[in-house]
Image: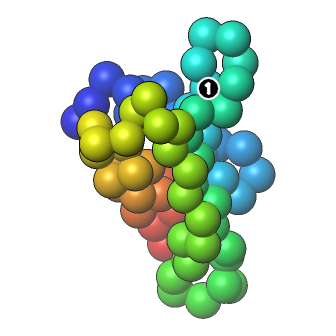
């Protein structure tokens, strides 16, 4: 688990990461299907963080926290 994982915050139907200035620098958005699954329909990772596995960490956070 990355140190960044502890900084992901749930905002509505998304998990986001903000920098010190409060700017959104990473996000995964999902749709709840009211079934036994959700659909991850959008990810965003700032250019400065690309290649560091942030999108994978966001997906792991989604799977862990939105389990039925």
User: Where residue 56 appears, x then y in whole percent?
Assistant: 33, 53
Q: Is residue 38 above or below residue 47?
A: below
- Drawn side of residue 7 relative to residue 1, left or right: right
User: Where residue 40 appears, x then y in whole percent?
Assistant: 54, 71
- The N terminus sits in image quarter: top left
- Drawn side of residue 17 relative to residue 50, left or right: right
Q: Residues within 10 Å of mark 1 (few under 14, many from 20)?
A: some
User: Does the image show residue 48?
Assistant: yes
Q: Which residue ends up furthest to the right in the rendered image? A: 12
User: Where residue 58 appears, x then y in whole percent?
Assistant: 43, 49
Name the quadrant containing residue 50: top left
Nearest to the observer: residue 46 or residue 35: 46
Mark 1 lies on a secondary structure that is strand
Q: Residue at x 67, y 74 (%)?
A: 31
What coloring was used for the rendering?
Answer: rainbow
Q: Which residue ends up furthest to the left in the rendered image? A: 1
- Drawn side of residue 55 relative to residue 18, left or right: left
Q: Which residue ends up furthest to the bottom in the rendered image? A: 35
Q: Residue at x 28, y 42 (%)?
A: 51
User: Does the image show residue 61?
Assistant: no
Residue at which label 1 appears: 18
Name the quadrant containing residue 22: top right
User: Where residue 49 appears, x then y in whole percent?
Assistant: 40, 33
Q: Is residue 35 above or below residue 59?
A: below
- Drawn side of residue 21 relative to residue 15, left or right: right
Q: Residue at x 70, y 24 (%)?
A: 23
Nearest to the observer: residue 41 or residue 33: 41
């Amino acid at each position: 688990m990355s140190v960044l994982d502890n900084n992901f915050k749930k905002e509505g139907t998304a998990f986001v990461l903000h920098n010190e200035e409060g700017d959104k620098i990473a996000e995964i958005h999902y749709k709840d299907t009211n079934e036994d699954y959700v659909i991850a329909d959008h990810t965003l990772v700032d250019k400065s963080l690309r290649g560091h596995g942030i999108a994978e960490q966001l997906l792991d956070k989604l799977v862990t926290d939105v389990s039925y």
